Image (spheres, rainbow, N blue to C red):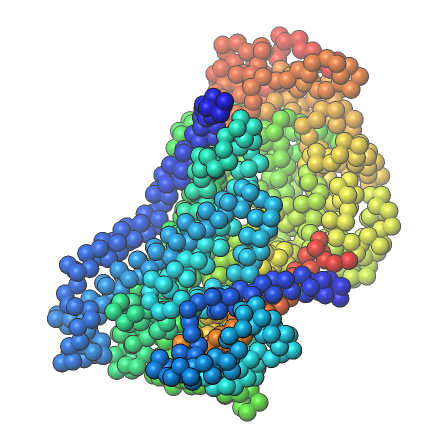
């Protein structure tokens, strides 16, 4: 098992390296001039030259990349061009917030999506199933940020049940933390819930239609037990891949949701860096997100092995 | 030199391969348009395109001109959907927003298609390093969430909707590239590309003439869904105020603007969001509809057959309706005396699909206690359906519409729920064709056996495990205790079938139904499994219903045999009788088609023609179109199963037995 995990981690390294090269080139091959960005167009050429020197921009791109990579491996992602704050520290401060939001969104999606999908699969073609299909189609089409606006309008502004904006750290006030997460995670989770419900439904229908279900029925095993023990576990195999993909989608979408609820997560950090072309922050954030995506995929692979004995590492 | 091969190479592939592709494509749209939801979506999309094109004519106001006297107004006759914080008409802004949304999504998908398809075709066709590098880059691009990548690209490329959508298009290109590459890889393997290559066609012309038409259906589906995603991303980017210039009216930026005034004028937040949702919904449903229509088992394709099927089926049903009364009388006569010690009595069993096709028509036979009964016939004759009907395991949309199945006096048809469950496994066990798919791949063999055991007994987990060990050694699985912990994929086909048989025997059934139990196995294993079944029947003193298309199997282990053709039992006989003196021409034909190991040099006789589909059973004797003895009177009327044979000429014909 340990060998498998290490092997997977090692095989992810080249991809990660390419991501960093890609992001680095993307940012450096473009005409953005960070010096002009920081000092403004009207700054004196002396000041510009001094800053360029300070930022190490005169060196060849390859050299800049290598020095960035060497410090990145040591956990130093450089400093913001604007605030001069350490990128690693800024990311460290905000990543937990984004992750808790994404995980809460996934929890909503799983709690809603799996039962809905199973229900649809048990009675395909009935009125209930069609209704479900409509709900799922709507869930797939509703933009999360609109849903967030509406939820905030109804439940926070009008009814006042939840805070309108802001984030309460978990250790400061656990109840406040949870209350603050309800609306954002709902807005975040609905789309993923629809994706999961759809996947669970088709995987369940396939599982229920399978030969082993027939065999178990023929042996007199109770239908309920077959659905719960056999079909559901078999259906989870394809669903798992979707969950992994959705986890990274949730991280990206939470960036938008953070903005609506003014949550100081990675998204807020990133959005500021996009607007200001603050490339060390931009670069660092993207690489960190890519690492996260790779880790999620690794976790999915391991979980896949736990569910599906065929690919289980021996 | 090259001219001639090209001329030669062209016609065959284009007639052989392009024709079905073209038909397939037309079929796809034909079927898609027949789906009401797809049609509605197409109509909405057409309407949106018209709105986008005619925006300046349709919009009552300038979408950008502020009008501070009318700030945040509610809907009125002057402003049908109200106004925003600057007094601009919401309806006009929505109309112009349609323009922005459609242009932006079409633009990015077009970029994605052109870029992705050319890259995909290229790397797919070139293969080797090109392919590896291309796919590695695709992996990298996809390990960054699309929205994030769009944000990064926007930050780099700079603001402006066109540029933003260029970024989105680049992201889509990765997805399209994968689709195109997959199709090219599949198409490459096809013979005609090889043939064209051998004949000296240039690779680029092979790509464009042969491969591109085949990529179209999956790409159209993909593109439709991408349009929805693009629209969503455009709205998101505009909402974030990134990548959009202030002169364009976008639904996303309308939503962003509404945030400040949502408590004063909530409607501002409703309309643009609804417009986005509806548009994305239309693209998604369109994609779903096209996907259904393009897949071979698309709903539309099946439906088209039905009208033709129904007329035939109703005529058939009428005929059989009158026939059924006749069937039961003669069929029950021979069973009457035998039925006394019969374990299973099937009489007049009729199984019908919801479309009216009869899969099994009035099947009758019985199986004595301790007897092995073979049910033979070609595929599609209703053998497996008959077996499934006995245990109430018919697929959806198929049901027993007549006749009876009695197990030792208990009527099984119409039994449901718990009563049926008590029969399954406990009194009747069943073994299916493919042992590997009959076992859940993600549960241990032990789990699957103990669940079967415990569903009919109050045994504890431990006791059930002991019983499972006992069963596995009974069916000859070595090291049974250890193997309980194994998963199905760790068993060979033959061993897996032994496990499945063990599961069927878990509760000592009186009757074991084996539906083609050896068909999926290696020839060398088949005999072992048959021997096992025969031995078990003897040891456990049960009855065995063996379904097979192989008369050799019947000869080896059966006592009596029923021959099925086109949903009917056409002959019931002892095995010796059927082999020496077959009474139905179909039985004779089956015997003649039996391979003989000894004189394998002889040309194998086959039965000309094939079993007709269930909705087109022939009138009269269903075998008459393929029968060498058929005369005029065989073509009409209902022919009953009389004294074990269903043939007009049974008395006069002298048929040849097995060689």
Q: Is residue A107 above or below residue B473?
A: below
Point out the image quarter for the C terminus of chain B: top right
Number of marks drawn = 0
**Measuring 57% from the left and 14% from the top, which residue is drawn there?**
B627
Task: Give percent across and percent down for residue A183.
Answer: 44, 78
| Residue A90 seen by the camera | no
Relative side of B238 to B91, left or right: right
**Measuring 53% from the left and 26% from the top, which residue is drawn there?**
B199
The foreground one among A15 and A262 is A15
Task: Give percent across and percent down for residue B591.
Answer: 69, 18
Q: Is residue B606 above or below residue B250?
A: above
| Residue A78 seen by the camera | yes
Q: Is residue B505 above or below residue B255?
A: above
The foreground one among A246 and B252 is B252
Determine the residue located farthest toward the front in the rendered image.
Answer: A46
Determine the residue located farthest toward the bottom in the rendered image.
Answer: A172
**Measuring 53% from the left and 32% from the top, which residue is drawn there?**
B193
Relative side of A150 to B630, left or right: left
**Measuring 54% from the left and 44% from the top, which residue is drawn there?**
B124
Task: Give percent across and percent down for residue A215.
Answer: 67, 47
């Amino acid at each position: 098992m340990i060998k498998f995990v290490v092997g997977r981690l090692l095989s992810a390294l080249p991809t990660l390296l390419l991501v960093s090269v890609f992001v680095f080139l993307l940012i450096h091959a473009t005409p953005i001039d960070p010096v002009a960005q920081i000092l403004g167009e009207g700054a004196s050429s002396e000041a510009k030259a001094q800053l360029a020197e300070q930022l190490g921009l005169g060196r060849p791109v390859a050299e800049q990349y290598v020095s960035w990579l060497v410090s990145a491996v040591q956990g130093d992602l450089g400093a913001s061009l604007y605030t001069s704050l350490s990128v690693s520290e800024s990311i460290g401060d905000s990543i937990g917030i984004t992750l808790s939001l994404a995980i809460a969104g996934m929890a909503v999606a799983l709690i809603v999506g799996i039962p809905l999908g199973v229900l649809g699969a048990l009675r395909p073609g009935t009125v209930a199933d069609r209704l479900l299909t409509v709900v799922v189609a709507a869930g797939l089409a509703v933009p999360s940020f609109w849903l967030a606006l509406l939820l905030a309008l109804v439940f926070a502004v009008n009814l006042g049940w939840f805070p309108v904006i802001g984030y309460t750290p978990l250790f400061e006030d656990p109840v406040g933390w949870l209350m603050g997460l309800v609306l954002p995670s709902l807005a975040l989770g609905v789309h993923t819930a629809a994706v999961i419900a759809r996947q669970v439904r088709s995987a369940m229908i396939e599982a229920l239609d399978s030969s082993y279900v027939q065999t178990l029925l023929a042996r007199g095993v109770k239908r309920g037990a077959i659905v719960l023990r056999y079909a559901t576990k078999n259906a989870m195999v394809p669903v798992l891949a979707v969950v992994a993909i959705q986890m990274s989608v949730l991280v990206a979408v939470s960036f938008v949701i953070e903005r609506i609820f003014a949550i100081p997560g990675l998204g807020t950090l990133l959005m500021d860096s996009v607007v200001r072309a603050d490339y060390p922050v931009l670069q660092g954030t993207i690489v960190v997100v890519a690492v996260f995506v790779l880790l999620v995929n690794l976790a999915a692979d391991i979980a896949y092995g736990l569910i599906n004995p065929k690919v289980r590492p021996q | 030199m090259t001219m001639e091969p090209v001329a030669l190479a062209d016609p065959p592939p284009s007639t052989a391969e392009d024709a079905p592709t073209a038909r397939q494509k037309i079929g796809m749209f034909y079927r898609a348009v027949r789906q009401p939801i797809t049609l509605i979506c197409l109509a909405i999309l057409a309407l949106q395109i018209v709105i986008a094109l005619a925006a300046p004519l349709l919009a009552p106001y300038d979408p950008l001109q502020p009008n501070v006297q009318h700030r945040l107004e509610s809907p009125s006759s002057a402003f049908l959907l109200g106004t925003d914080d600057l007094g601009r008409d919401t309806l006009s802004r929505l109309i112009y927003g349609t323009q922005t949304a459609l242009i932006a999504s079409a633009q990015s998908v077009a970029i994605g298609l052109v870029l992705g398809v050319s890259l995909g075709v290229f790397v797919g066709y070139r293969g080797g390093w090109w392919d590896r590098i291309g796919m590695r880059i695709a992996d990298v691009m996809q390990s960054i969430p699309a929205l994030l990548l769009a944000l990064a690209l926007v930050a780099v490329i700079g603001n402006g909707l066109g540029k933003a959508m260029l970024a989105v298009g680049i992201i889509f290109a990765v997805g399209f590239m994968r689709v195109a590459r997959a199709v090219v890889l599949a198409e490459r393997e096809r013979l005609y590309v090889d043939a064209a290559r051998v004949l000296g066609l240039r690779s680029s012309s092979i790509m464009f003439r042969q491969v591109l038409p085949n990529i179209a259906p999956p790409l159209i589906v993909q593109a439709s869904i991408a349009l929805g995603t693009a629209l969503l991303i455009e709205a998101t980017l505009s909402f974030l105020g990134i990548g959009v210039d202030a002169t364009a009216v976008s639904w996303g930026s309308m939503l962003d603007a509404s945030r400040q005034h949502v408590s004063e004028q909530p409607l501002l937040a409703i309309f643009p969001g609804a417009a986005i949702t509806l548009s994305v919904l239309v693209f998604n449903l369109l994609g779903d509809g096209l996907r259904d229509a393009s897949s071979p088992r698309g709903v539309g394709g099946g439906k088209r057959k039905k009208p033709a099927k129904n007329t035939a089926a109703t005529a058939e049903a009428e005929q059989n309706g009158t026939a059924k009364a006749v069937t039961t009388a003669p069929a029950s006569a021979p069973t009457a005396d035998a039925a006394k010690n019969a374990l299973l009595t099937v009489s007049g069993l009729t199984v019908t699909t919801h479309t009216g096709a009869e899969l099994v028509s009035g099947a009758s036979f019985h199986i004595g206690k301790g007897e092995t009964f073979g049910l033979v016939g070609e595929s599609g004759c209703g053998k497996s359906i008959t077996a499934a009907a006995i245990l109430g395991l018919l697929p959806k949309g198929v049901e027993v519409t007549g006749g009876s199945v009695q197990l030792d006096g208990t009527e099984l048809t119409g039994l449901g729920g718990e009563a049926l469950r008590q029969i399954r496994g406990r009194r009747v066990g069943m073994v299916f064709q493919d042992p590997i798919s009959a076992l859940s791949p993600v549960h241990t063999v032990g789990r699957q056996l103990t669940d079967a055991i415990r569903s009919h007994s109050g045994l504890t987990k431990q006791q059930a495990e002991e019983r499972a060990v006992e069963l596995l050694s009974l069916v000859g699985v070595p090291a049974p205790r250890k193997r309980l912990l194994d998963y199905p994929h760790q068993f060979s086909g033959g061993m897996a079938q032994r496990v499945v048989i063990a599961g069927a025997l878990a509760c000592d059934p009186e009757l074991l139904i084996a539906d083609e139990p050896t068909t999926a196995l290696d020839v060398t294993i088949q005999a072992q499994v048959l021997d096992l079944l025969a031995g078990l029947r003897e040891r456990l003193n049960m009855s065995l219903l063996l379904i097979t298309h192989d008369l050799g199997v019947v000869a080896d282990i059966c006592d009596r045999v029923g021959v099925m053709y086109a949903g009917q039992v056409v002959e019931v006989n002892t095995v010796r009788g059927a082999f020496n003196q077959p009474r139905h021409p179909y039985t004779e034909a089956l015997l003649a088609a039996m391979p003989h190991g000894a004189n394998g040099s002889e040309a194998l006789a086959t039965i000309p023609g094939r079993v007709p589909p269930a909705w087109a059973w022939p009138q009269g004797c269903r075998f008459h179109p393929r029968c060498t003895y058929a005369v005029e009177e065989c073509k009409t009327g209902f022919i009953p199963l009389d004294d074990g044979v269903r043939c007009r000429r049974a008395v006069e014909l002298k048929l040849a037995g097995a060689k």
